[in-house]
Amino acid sequence: MSGAVMAPYSDRIIGSAEARRRFTNLVVSKEAMEAAIFYFKEKKSEIFELYQSFSPLKKKDSAQILEYYAKFYQLIENPDLVKSKILNLLPGEVVGR
C-alpha cells in the first residue's frame, strides 16, 4: 500500500495514481497472501469510506488514493489477475487455481 500514501520507496509513475513497491526477496506463502487478499476484500467498503470522509485530507489527495485503491481492487477481485500478477510470483506451486 506504499503507493496509496506515496511512500518514498514506492515507484510512482508520473501523472498516474499507479504505484508499485519494489520487492526484493519477497518470501510469503500463497496461503498468507490469499488470507491478506481476503482480508482486504472484507474491508473494501471501510477503506473507501475512510478516505472519502477523512476531512483533514485534501480532496485531490483523497481522489488519488481512491483511484489507487480502485485499481488495487480491480486486481484482487479478478481471480485470473490474482493468479498471474500475485500468486504465480510467489515461491511454490499454485494449487487449485
Image: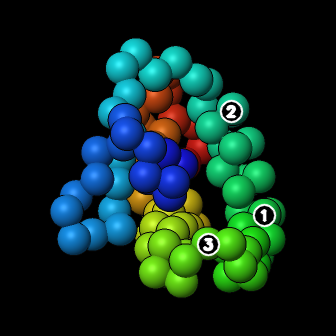
> Would you name the residue on which mark 1 appears?
43
Q: Distance between the residues labelled 3 and 1?
A: 20 Å
Rendered position, 91 above or below 65: above
- Which disc number belongs to residue 31? 2
Mark 2 element type: helix
Q: Tell me which amino acid carries mark 2.
A: Glu
**Of tags 2 and 3, which is closer to the observer?**
3
Q: Residue at x 54, y 83 (%)?
A: 59
Q: Which residue is drawn at 49% across and 73% down?
A: 61
| Residue projecting furthest to the left | 14
> Would you name the residue on which mark 3 appears?
57
Residue 78 appears in the picture as rendered: no
Mark 1 element type: loop
Q: How far apart are marks 2 and 3 (CA)?
A: 35 Å
Q: How crowded is mark 2: few (under 14 residues within 10 Å), some or many (20 or more)?
A: few
Rendered position, 25 above or below 54: above
Residue 62 appears in the picture as rendered: yes
Q: How far apart are marks 2 and 1 (CA)?
A: 18 Å
Q: Earlier in the sequence, mark 2 or mark 1?
A: 2
Rendered position, 93 above or below 3: above
